Image (spheres, grey):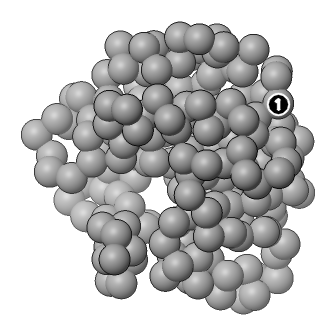
Amino acid sequence: MTSFEESYQDISHWDTGRPQAEFVNLEKAGEIDGSVLDVGCGTGENALYLAQKGYQVTGVDSSPTALTKAMLKVAERGLKVKFLLFDSLQLEHLGTVFDTIIDSGLFHSYSGEKRSLFVKSLSGVLRPGGYYHMLCLSEVDSGLSGPKSVTKGDIRFNFRDGWDIKAIRKARFEINYGCGWNWAWLASILRL
């Protein structure tokens, strides 16, 4: 059982029961476009929010427990979202491309070589001219245990070829313990 799967057996720290405010704000600002992939969708709150707003949304995650919870929410809310058990390092095998990809805390779970593989996987399913919006823990909260924190330099390094970083903004990653959030980066990155 993966650490993600284990965390979904109980209540995970990042499963707040609502969409991340940063993605709500992006949608309201018109920065989400067309078909959407929620990579590392967890229990689906961000995907469900966007589906409610009329987007065609697919959510992928490697945790069967998280996806079961997401599918129950779809049924309860009467929304249409396609949830798939899928390896985010092999997204090109989905057989489709998307206009927008959102990522709420997946990038920061990878380190080293896996980050490079993840970025390559993203480029296989995001159309040229499409945006990847990533919310990841920043180095400001580097004392935390758990996922690796990310610096602006990490983002610039990993998205240096075939991408154009349009913005890296200081943000809040909402959680369900402590003060209710951690410092994060919200990066909006164009695929060339």
Question: On screen, 4 above or below 67?
Answer: above
In the rendered structure, which amino acid carries the disc numbered 1? Arg
Residue 43 placement (x, y as % from top left): 55, 71
Q: Are there few (<14), some (14-19), or many (20+) residues within 10 Å of tag 1? A: some
59 lies left or right of 186? right
Nearer to us in this view, 166 or 179: 166
Question: On screen, 163 above or below 66?
Answer: above
The answer to whether any part of residue 78 appears in the image is: yes
Residue 89 placement (x, y as % from top left): 54, 47
187 lies left or right of 83? left
Residue 72 placement (x, y as % from top left): 65, 87
Nearer to us in this view, 34 or 63: 63
Q: Residue at x 14, y 51 (%)?
A: 145
Q: Residue at x 79, y 69 (%)?
A: 81
Residue 50 placement (x, y as % from top left): 75, 56
In this view, which residue lies farthest toward the left? 143
Q: Quadrant of the C terminus?
A: top right
- Please give the residue where the numbered disc 1 appears in the rendered image: 127
Question: On screen, 28 above or below 120?
Answer: below
Question: On screen, 70 above or below 111?
Answer: below
Q: Quadrant of the N terminus?
A: bottom left
Nearer to us in this view, 93 or 163: 93
Where disc 1 sits, the SS reads strand
Q: Residue at x 82, y 22 (%)?
A: 128
Q: Quadrant of residue 127?
A: top right
81 lies left or right of 168? right
Nearer to us in this view, 50 or 35: 35
The answer to whether any part of residue 24 appears in the image is: no
Q: Quadrant of residue 189?
A: top right
Q: Residue at x 61, y 49 (%)?
A: 90
Q: Quadrant of residue 115?
A: top left
